[in-house]
Amino acid sequence: MELDKMDENDWKYHGEGNKSLVVSHVQHSRVLRLLKYPSEDAENTHQTTEQAFQHILNIVDYTRNVMKPLLGEKYVHSGEVVKLPLDFVRQLSLKIQQERPELRCDKVMDTFSGCGLCLPNLTHLSPCHFGDRRPPLCVEIKPKCGFLPFSRHVTKECKRKVCRFCMHQHFKLANGKWNRLSRYCPLDLFSGSKQRMYIAIKNLLEEPQNNLKIFKGGELIYSCKEDAKQQPDLNELVQHLWPYFHHGNGHQSSRTVLSEFIQVICSALLSSGDSNRSGEQRKMQLAESRVLCEASPLHRDLLRNGSPGLPKDCVLAKILQAQMMDNLDIEGLYPLYKRVEQYLEEFPKERNRLQIDGPYDASFLEKVKTCPPEDDGSIEYAVGKVLQYRVAMTAKDCSIMITFAPCGEDEKLQPHLEIQPTKSRFSFSVSILDLDPKPYESIPNQYKLDSKIVNYYLKSTNATQ
Ligand code: ATP
Ligand code: ZN
Ligand code: MG
Ligand code: MG
């Protein structure tokens, strides 16, 4: 990519989240991730170029030096900061404006700094798969928090029984964020039980909200509808999937196509990132009480089967491990945050040494890893826990990209299909994206939000309990 010869016609709108907007190159397998601002802030408080540059540099450093070592080299791509011509960024912003979903237009793309993040396009598969004309499929899942809090600081009993995602659903419904409750429960996805995972993914397909997107050949083909009242069309999805899951001879029902598709996703989530490895693997096992959410529609029936746990190196285990660095819960963490605040008030210069706002380097990771196990009353303990909490927040908010394409030899391998559909027919890659640092300053908001969600849940479900 030649930065001085950037042409907006080489790029197209790809997607966006709350913090950034992504465009993809029409030929090369690259994306540009650009920051967004609340539109009312755009004119008066926009960051200086220097600040924007530092912000993106922080994202890269944090992803590369903190999250990548924790989540595994093979899953994380940190990308690089690029300085783009302002003219290009402005033209690009105009060009893509009409393709942006309305619910995201409360923010505008940063057209002032010219700073962006260049990443591989994870909806494509590399290295190229030869011998097959079917474009790769990519499933993006934002799994959210996969365990129940186990901290003794938790004051509300319901937090030990119902997971955060399921409680949050009620709050979001009441606030008009969504029109229907999702039946997805992260604890089912992280259970390692094929049956529970299957149902979790099925529930995501039925109500994707912002937790599921599907791409084909890099194009978004399935996600929540722009009009939140409408449900996305599963039949349309089946039409897209059919060419990947028909086996030459018989007629495949929609149910079979979807079921095979879900099984491929499950296998990718449980694999060690390397599609050829096999054999007995070590498992990550949590106490039974932490992995069952009472709000999930199915836990009672599947309880009998116990929970098999996750293979230790699979992407879900890696993410769950990082999420569980939040082992005090926000209720136990908040007093430590206040200890840090008080200390910084007294010794403001210590902020740098304690790396509260970075730099996100090896010594930051060291602080995260070597935090004392028990509270010895020190500032080091408080800071260590705060940093661990922030790592966990990032892991609770990231997305998994599973990209797969037929190997091109499926006709030959057909006898195996029924038994192990993924191993014989698809090559795939699994990555984790959206690993931005969560600001230290957001901790008080997290504390308030937690109590709002829990109180609302108690209030709204009391009648039926
Ligand atoms: P959130 O609101 O979830 O925090 P965000 O604003 O931080 O989101 P991202 O999740 O990084 O933004 O990116 C927005 C979307 O762009 C993603 O959901 C994904 O669909 C797409 N995307 C981001 N990075 C890539 C990539 N490297 N390759 C392909 N698609 C990507
Ligand atoms: Zn749940
Ligand atoms: Mg995201
Ligand atoms: Mg994000």
Image: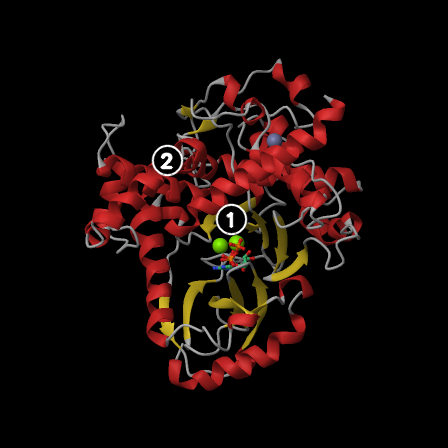
Secondary structure of the residue carrying tag 1 is strand
The image shows residue 336, relative to residue 177, as above or below, that is: above
To which quarter of the image does residue 295 belong? Answer: top right
Which quadrant is home to the C terminus? Answer: top right
Q: Earlier in the sequence, mark 1 or mark 2?
A: 2
Q: Nearer the viewer, residue 209 or 348?
A: 348
Q: Are there few (<14), some (14-19), or many (20+) residues within 10 Å of tag 1? A: many
Nearer the observer: mark 1 or 2; the answer is: 2
**Residue hosting label 1:** 399
To which quarter of the image does residue 207 belong? Answer: top right
Q: Are there few (<14), some (14-19), or many (20+) residues within 10 Å of tag 2? A: few
Residue located 78% across and 42% down the image: 254
Q: Position of residue 289 (x, y in %)?
A: 52, 18
Q: Nearer the viewer, residue 171 or 245?
A: 171
Residue located 24% across and 41% down the image: 367
Compared across the picture, whether 343 is left or right of 315 comes to left
Q: Can residue 22 be seen at all in this image of the molecule?
A: yes
Which quadrant is home to the N terminus? Answer: bottom left
Secondary structure of the residue carrying tag 2 is helix
Q: In the image, what residue type sits under mark 2?
A: Pro
Q: Is mark 1 within 8 Å of ligand 3?
A: yes
Report the residue that reaches farthest toward the front. 346
Q: Position of residue 28 (x, y in %)?
A: 48, 70
Q: Position of residue 274 (x, y in %)?
A: 43, 41
Q: Nearer the viewer, residue 204 or 408?
A: 204
Number of numbered labels in the structure image: 2
Q: Can residue 421 be seen at all in this image of the molecule?
A: no
**Residue hosting label 2:** 335
